[in-house]
Image: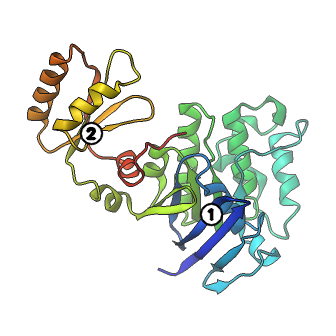
């Protein structure tokens, strides 16, 4: 499949801070690529360079297999951008806002079609200042689509939204995928990447630590299942952790105090955990048995959880 974007050895430093530290990846035409990582990993800096909002220190950027030294009007005409936060005029309606941004392009989609796509039909004549957070994010998506872009950048589009608003936005993004839009999505929500992406790039401290399809990444975690539990104090206990780790070398303690135990034999491992904790006069709370996920991939590669 031809590439919409290719990045080679992209670098951006702020003083001694290596925000983007020599990363390379590509995005195929018609696919959704998720750049997954914690806050401060370098996701936003990367996409802002691709959008022309920041200049890289070094590296090569290709759009549709042609190198681009500056993201100018030719590229900006075929990309749409939804930033982490967007500011609109409070006293314009939803329809007026979309119409205003459409006037910036020689070609634009009709406000009515975009309002229907992002499911804001009942809010068409509502002032921006009276929209909820989720409705404003859907308006921001409509504005990003106003020029019918070939490539859409979504920079943490659901941060701060409640679960229902997040799901509504996911539904709209899935509609765009069905229309074969090329999408670059940055997120620190593991489930968002799992639900929306065709391929995933995991980034931490400005470096790519893994990339591939969801199945490819999960296959790097050799364990079949995981046992997760907490202790009554909810913050973990280093002494108990060290004792358990003598018997379970792969045991991890997450940043929020959750014990994560990889295992190939659930029954034997559970029995051993309960016996060991009983000998240490401790109890188990909130025990969960599950299959591997992206969090496990991230934990294995970086040694810490995918923190917000």
Task: Give the mark nearer the N terminus: 2 vs 1.
Answer: 1
Q: Nearer the viewer, residue 300 or 48?
A: 300
Disc 1: CA contacts within 10 A as few (<14), some (14-19) or many (>=20): many
- Up-down: is 221 above or below 132? below
Q: Can residue 276 be seen in this view?
A: yes
Percent coordinates x, y for residue 80 in the rendering: 71, 62
- Residue 251's label in the rendered image is 2
Percent coordinates x, y for residue 145 in the rendering: 71, 58
Query: Would residue 126 appear left or right of 177 to someone viewing this image?
Result: right
Secondary structure of the residue carrying numbered label 2:
loop
The residue at the far left in this view is 268
Residues at circles 2 and 1 in contact by the CB criterion of under 8 Å: no
Disc 2: CA contacts within 10 A as few (<14), some (14-19) or many (>=20): many
Q: Mark 1 points at which residue?
A: 20
- Where on the picture, by quarter, is residue 214? bottom left
Residue drawn at 32 percent across, 20 percent down = 231
- Model colouring: rainbow
- Up-down: is 55 above or below 187? below
Residue drawn at 45 percent across, 34 percent down = 255
């Amino acid at each position: 499949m031809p590439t919409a974007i290719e990045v080679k050895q992209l670098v951006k430093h702020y003083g001694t801070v290596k925000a983007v530290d020599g990363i390379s990846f590509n995005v195929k035409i018609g696919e959704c690529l998720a750049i997954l990582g914690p806050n401060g990993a370098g996701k936003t800096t990367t996409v802002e360079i691709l959008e022309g909002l920041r200049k890289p220190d070094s590296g090569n950027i290709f759009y549709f297999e042609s190198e681009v030294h500056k993201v100018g009007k030719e590229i900006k005409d075929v990309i749409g951008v939804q930033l982490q936060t967007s500011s609109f005029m409070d006293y314009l309606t939803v329809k007026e806002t979309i119409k205003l941004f459409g006037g910036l392009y020689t070609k634009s989609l009709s406000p009515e079609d975009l309002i229907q796509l992002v499911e804001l039909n009942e809010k068409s004549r509502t002032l921006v200042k009276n929209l909820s957070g989720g409705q404003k994010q859907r308006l921001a998506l409509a504005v990003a689509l106003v020029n019918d872009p070939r490539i859409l950048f979504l920079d943490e589009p659901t941060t701060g939204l409640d679960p229902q608003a997040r799901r509504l936005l996911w539904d709209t993004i899935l509609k765009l995928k069905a229309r074969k839009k090329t999408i670059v999505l940055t997120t620190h929500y593991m489930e968002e990447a799992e639900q929306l992406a065709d391929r995933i790039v995991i980034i931490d401290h400005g470096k790519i630590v893994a990339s591939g399809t969801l199945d490819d990444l999960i296959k790097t975690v050799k364990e079949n299942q995981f046992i997760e539990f907490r202790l009554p104090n909810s913050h973990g206990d280093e002494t108990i952790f060290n004792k358990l780790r003598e018997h379970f070398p792969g045991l991890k303690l997450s940043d929020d105090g959750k014990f994560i135990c990889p295992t190939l034999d659930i029954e034997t491992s559970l029995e051993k955990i309960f016996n060991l904790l009983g000998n240490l006069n401790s109890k188990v709370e909130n025990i969960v048995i599950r299959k591997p996920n992206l969090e496990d991939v991230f934990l294995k590669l970086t040694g810490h959880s995918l923190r917000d």
